[in-house]
Image: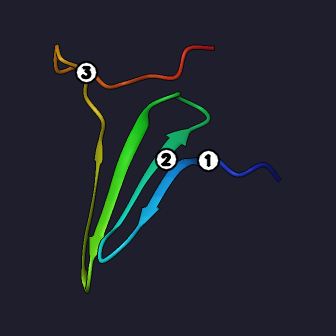
Amino acid sequence: MRQRFEQIYAQDSTAQTEIWVDRETGVHYLFHRVGCAAGVTPLLDRNGKPVVLKK
């Protein structure tokens, strides 16, 4: 079974930052974690629209 989300960027230092792409919708998501706190949000372009992978 193919994974729905694909990690396309990762940066680890004192904080963890990753960008994931939903393979079904093409929407990019930003994941960020510092210690025990974490969050995820869709990436937006300058017009406030979600960044979408062009197929």
Q: Position of residue 55 (x, y in %)?
A: 63, 14
Q: Position of residue 42 (x, y in %)?
A: 31, 40
> Considering depth in this image, is 10 or 30 the residue closer to the camera?
10
Left or right: 14, with 5 as reference point = left
- Provide the secondary structure element on which disc 1 rests: strand
- Provide the secondary structure element on which disc 2 rests: strand
Badge 2 crowding class, 10 Å Cα cut-off, few under 14, some 14 to 19, many 20 or more, is many
Q: Give the residue number, with chain letter if any, for mark 3.
A: 45
Res 20 label: 2
> Which is nearer the N-term, disc 1 or disc 2?
1
Q: Give the residue number, with chain letter if any, for mark 1.
A: 6
Q: Position of residue 48 (x, y in %)?
A: 17, 21
Residue lying farthest to the bottom in this orientation: 36
Q: CA distance from mark 1 to mark 3?
A: 20 Å
Is 26 situated above or below 22?
above
Q: Position of residue 17 (x, y in %)?
A: 36, 60
> Which is nearer the N-term, disc 1 or disc 3?
1
Q: Residue at x 55, y 14 (%)?
A: 54
